[in-house]
Image: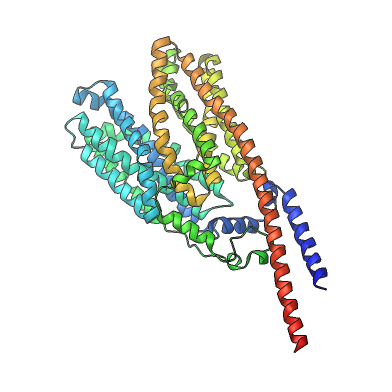
Amino acid sequence: MRSEVFQQYLSEEAGHTHTQLHTSRASQFTSTQANMAAKAARNLGYIPPDGGWGWAIVLASFISIGFAYAFPKSLTIYYHEIQEYFSVSYSQIAWVSSVMLASMYAAGPVSSILVNRFGSRPVVMVGGLMVCSAMVLASFGTSIVHLYLCVGVIGGFGLALNLQPALTIIGTYFHAKRPLANGLAMTGSPVVLFTLAPLNQFLFDSFGWRGSFLILGALLLNCCVAGSLMRPVNKEVPAELQREPCESDGAQQVPEDNPRGVEIQNERHEKGCIDVSLFKHRGFLIYLIGNVLMFFGFFAPVVFLAPYAKHLGVDEYSAAFLLSIFALVDVFVRPATGLLGNTKWIRPRIQYLFSFAVSYNGVCQLLCPLASGYVGLVVYVVFFGMAFGMVCSLLFEVLMDLVGAHRFSSAVGLVTIIECGPVLLGPPLSGALVDILGDYKYMYYACGVFMLVPGIFFFIMHYYNYKRLDEEQRRQQSAQMRTCGEAVQTKMDQAGTQREREFAV
């Protein structure tokens, strides 16, 4: 009788496992949102809300990310007056934004450590106070070095304390809708830049650069408001995680002697420092190598778009309007990409969408020199804006997909400090290429190669990575089935022994 029951159990388990093996990641998203929540619960130790207060978190991240990425670019409106006031060269004044970006990227690991220890809310609020103080102090500046220290170093560090926490907290509130949430949050960058550009011009005309810096300092206190919205997620452990491994419908579980091992592991990561074991993570290394190459050619086409148009004989206002078209396309493409990435067909293999976006960006740069006349440039800008928005919308979502939400804070800190080099060197090297060869088209060719090569690299390596992950999942499920079978056999033996003792009595 025991053997018949055992055989029946094994046949049920085998049928369930067979179904799991032949339903790839896509089938996990065709079932229900409940299955997504169960998967998140097993990986994170709790069920993300995927809504509710999470949308307030998206709004807060929208503000923080928007200021972090757009604010350094928006300061260029004041460069001419500051250059004349301090009697410095254009290259010297351009270092203000460069130092600010460098500080923002270099402070990534510090920001990640603070987020792991204290959470996102206090870190963002302190960052907002730092950026505000930096702009207020800069308004009393007496030399260009003063601006380097205040706007560049202090302001850049404050922006770093806004960027990483905003990116990290989205992963704690969302799982099934995470690509959409990330896409909406990343839309903050073009929207804030689109808003700050005319605002800065108005402030400059009305109050000069010193008065404008004071007002911008007050405006940046909105980062503190955004930080106050970032309350920690309620990490309730579902009852399913506290059951024994063989009592949970064959789903992946933690060992029987530690039913809350996932939660304990997550808490250990949250209370620790930077997780340097990520350098042994296959997916993280793929992402890091490809992004380092990509960022050498990612920002230069945007920086040199207006100068290139003027080089072709386009007037200043029409050249500036190209940037407006680019920003407008970018605003709509980012949330649209988030919606596309959240579909049941794309989400299981979202790394391929990112690979396509990077490759598509490279093709746009290679074809840019073929655009003739202003209409040709407008067509190029529209397609380039689509490619740029797709990459930005997926940039951190794919990293979170690779390493998991509980390790994302450490991952983004390590990535930003390593990417600091190519982000800073890309535009100057591109400008040097224009100076040496005397033509912008070679710069666009170089940027296209720097984008297309990592795009192809991502396609190849993610195919390999997905294949390895599927193989590891099959081995894990097979091992789990054997373990469950042995556990059931042991329980049945114990029950049989107990009955024999009762009959003997």
Horizontal relation, residue 484 to residue 317: left or right: right
Which residue is rendered at x = 58% and y = 58% of the image? Answer: 42
Residue 354 in picture, x, y percent from top left: 57, 36
Residue at the limit of the structure toward the front, as seen here = 504
Residue 151 in picture, x, y percent from top left: 27, 36
Which residue is rendered at x = 49% and y = 22% of the image? Answer: 447
Total residue callouts: 0
| 151 shown above or below 303 | below
Depth order, front residue of 206/57? 57
Residue 454 in picture, x, y percent from top left: 54, 28
Depth order, front residue of 145/337? 145
Q: Quadrant of the C terminus?
A: bottom right
Q: Quadrant of the N terminus?
A: bottom right
Whether residue 416 can be seen here: yes
Which residue is rendered at x = 60% and y = 42% of the image? Answer: 341
Residue at the limit of the structure toward the bottom, as seen here = 505
| Protein image colouring | rainbow
- Residue 457 position by quadrant: top right
Residue at the limit of the structure toward the left, as seen here = 142
